[in-house]
């Protein structure tokens, strides 16, 4: 599942993002209302976590704009504004749920699961390509009916590939969606994780290659028969 975090406090945004990745979600971060609407318009998300007090365009306006274009995507407001009037305004602006800071991540996670169960009905419940199956609800990945054990990061990378089948994904896009734009680790981290995934997806060593390298561009998830 792909989640957009709209939060201008970088420490909170980083905490949320790391926690969601550990729960095997993929997460993007936007630090202001303009960036949030831009990312929302160019990507597909399953859920949005939204702070109200953000720069450039405030959270309530962002919520209203998103809701006017998409009646299904779950929006969870997470803010320090805790009065009854603020909660009413947030829910009336189109939010599906409202949490106040400080917050418990375990409670946030439970609310996310509840909202996703309600879900964006336009999204497929199960992602498949060839004989590979990924169930976003259970986080179970199978190939040839064998369960593949993935780390949280490997799972996020695979889900991002499977939600963008037959599309060339640049290393920059992968970093933004599976890591984040400020990631300062090893420059070959993507190649390393693609290598890990390819090895695990082989299962019995005979399965078709699904992740293909496009030299100078990035990677594409594509069934071998279509390659």
Image (cartoon, rainbow, N blue to C red):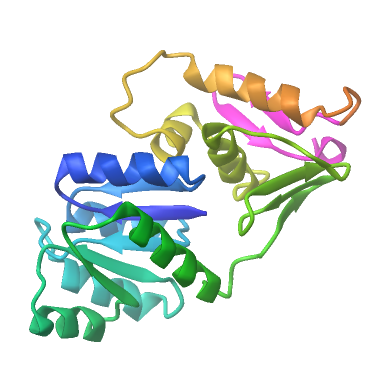
Could you say where residue 171 lies in the image, as x and y percent from the top left? 48, 27
> In screen coordinates, is 46 left or right of 135?
left
Q: Nearer the viewer, residue 216 or 21?
A: 21
Could you say where residue 6 lies in the image, as x and y percent from the top left? 25, 55
Q: Could you tell me which residue is drawn at 35 percent across and 77 percent down?
A: 96
Q: Note whether residue 27 is visible.
A: yes
Relative vertical location of residue 174 with respect to residue 31 in this rendering, above or below:
above
The stretch of residues the image draws in magenta is: 208-227
Q: Could you tell me which residue is drawn at 65 percent across and 19 percent down?
A: 195
Q: Note whether residue 214 is visible.
A: no
Could you say where residue 50 lies in the image, as x and y percent from the top left? 25, 62
Could you say where residue 13 lies in the image, as x and y percent from the top left? 24, 45
The quadrant holding residue 151 is top right
Q: Nearer the viewer, residue 96 or 128?
A: 96
Q: How many marks overall?
A: 0
Q: Nearer the viewer, residue 80 or 66?
A: 80
Q: In which quarter of the image is the C terminus?
A: top right
> In screen coordinates, is 136 left or right of 142?
left
Q: Is residue 213 magenta?
A: yes
Q: Could you tell me which residue is drawn at 64 percent across and 55 percent down?
A: 138
Q: Could you tell me which residue is drawn at 17 percent across and 73 percent down?
A: 60
> In screen coordinates, is 170 left or right of 133?
left
The quadrant holding residue 168 is top right
> In screen coordinates, is 198 left or right of 74?
right
């Amino acid at each position: 599942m792909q989640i957009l975090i709209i939060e201008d406090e970088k420490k909170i945004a980083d905490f949320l993002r790391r926690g969601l990745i550990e729960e095997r979600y993929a997460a993007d971060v936007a630090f202001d209302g303009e960036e949030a609407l831009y990312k929302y318009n160019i990507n597909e998300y399953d859920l949005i976590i939204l702070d109200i007090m953000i720069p450039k365009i405030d959270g309530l306006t962002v919520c209203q704009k998103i809701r006017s274009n998409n009646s299904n995507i779950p929006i969870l407001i997470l803010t320090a504004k805790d009065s009854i009037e603020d909660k009413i305004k947030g829910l009336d602006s189109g939010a599906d749920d409202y949490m106040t800071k400080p917050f418990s991540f375990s409670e946030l996670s439970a609310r996310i699961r509840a909202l996703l169960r309600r879900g964006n009905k336009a999204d497929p419940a199960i992602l498949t390509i060839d004989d590979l199956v990924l169930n976003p609800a259970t986080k179970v990945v199978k190939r040839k009916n064998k369960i593949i054990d993935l780390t949280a990061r490997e799972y996020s990378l695979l889900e991002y590939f499977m939600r963008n089948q037959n599309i060339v994904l640049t290393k920059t896009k992968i970093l933004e969606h599976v890591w984040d734009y400020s990631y300062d680790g090893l420059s070959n981290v993507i190649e390393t994780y693609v290598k890990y995934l390819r090895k695990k997806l082989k299962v019995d060593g005979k399965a078709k290659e699904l992740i293909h390298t496009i030299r100078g561009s990035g990677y594409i998830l594509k069934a071998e028969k279509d390659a």
